[in-house]
Image (cartoon, rainbow, N blue to C red):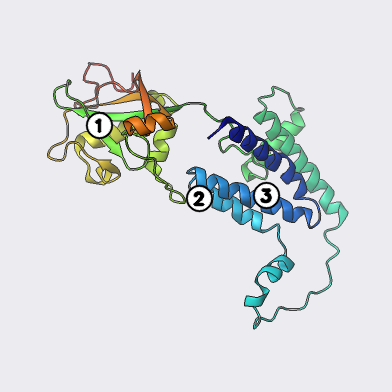
Amino acid sequence: WPRWFHKLSVVVLFAIELVSPVLVFAPPPFSYVAGAAFVLLMLLIMITGNYCFFNLLAIALSVLLFDDAVWLTLFGRFLTGVRFPATGPLSRGWPVWTIVPVALVVALLSGQVICRLLRSSARWPKPLERLIGWLEPFRLVNGYGLFSVMTTGRREIIVEGSNDGFDWRVYEFKWKPGDVNRRPRFVAPHQPRLDWQMWFAALSHYQSTLWFRSFLMRLLQGSPEVLALLEKNPFSDKPPRLIRAVFYDYRFTDFAGRQSTGAWWRRERRGSYSPVLSLRDGVGADGRSSGE
């Protein structure tokens, strides 16, 4: 896409994410505008990316910004035989003496969460720290941490097996990038747990990703349940003697490169993610412990 389109997309994104949340608290029709903007943004993300069911959850929340009058206007002709109960008198709401303490507690907890998100080292008075510590297990206020920090590159883990330490064959996953000639697949709203966790594993160290070591051991054992999670098992007759994980940087090819090579990705090897492993008590084939 041309550069101006990307810049326009960023402007629209920030306009929706910074202005629409304020309109949520405004009366109709401004709250309707906020709801429509959120739904539009989620639909655009669903068309261009794979965020599993998260966009559907956001749309479900955004729908609540439209009251019954909107739905009757849109779908009233399909509900001609439906009788709606008459609207009763509006409640006067909660008394002020109950709202103010709750609002103060929420404001206090929100301030603490905001300081944590901003990595502020501000110290709270001891009584407030004790109160926050007592209320925190109830999860009354939570920070929004989903992709709050976006990466600028795509580092992928490629799992390879071998019987001699020279000829390495690749295990292909069903969804995540691997073969550079394979077109990226749409997976939403499904969330493939293994492929999803592989992305997080690439953002951390092998030593701290305990489940990944177990995953490699199951491949060495030829576990049918684990192999069923993969697209391609290069050792269909017998599990390999050795296994390793390698780091690659992946980037999309441009249109010209796609037309000339047929590849969707270009990649560059960045080194090893794990040591070479064997089934010998989970010890690396190079003599080091798999946790080293």
Q: Label 3 sits on what residue type? A: Ala
Q: Nearer the viewer, mark 2 or mark 3?
A: 3
Left or right for 214, reference 118: left
Upstream in sequence: badge 1 or badge 2: 2
The structure residue drawn at horizontal position 82% and vertical position 51%, both measured from the top left corner, is: 99
Determine the image quadrant of residue 68: bottom right
Q: CA distance from mark 1 to mark 2?
A: 30 Å
Q: Secondary structure at mark 1?
A: strand
Residue situated in front as seen by the camera: 159 or 218: 159
Residue lying at the far top in this picture: please name it: 287
Q: Label 2 sits on what residue type? A: Phe
Residue situated in front as seen by the camera: 267 or 22: 267
Please give the label number shown on residue 53: 2
Label 1 sits on residue: 170
Upstream in sequence: badge 3 or badge 1: 3
Residue lying at the far bottom in this picture: please name it: 81
Upstream in sequence: badge 2 or badge 3: 3
Q: CA distance from mark 3 to mark 1?
A: 43 Å
* Residue 209 seen in this snapshot: no
Q: Are marks 3 and 1 in contact (CB under 8 Å)?
A: no
Residue 49 position within the rendered picture, expressed as x and y whole percent measured from the top left: 49, 42
Q: Secondary structure at mark 2?
A: loop
Q: Are marks 2 and 3 in contact (CB under 8 Å)?
A: no
What is the quadrant of the C terminus in the image?
top left
* Residue 256 seen in this snapshot: yes
The structure residue drawn at horizontal position 42% and vertical position 39%, both measured from the top left corner, is: 196
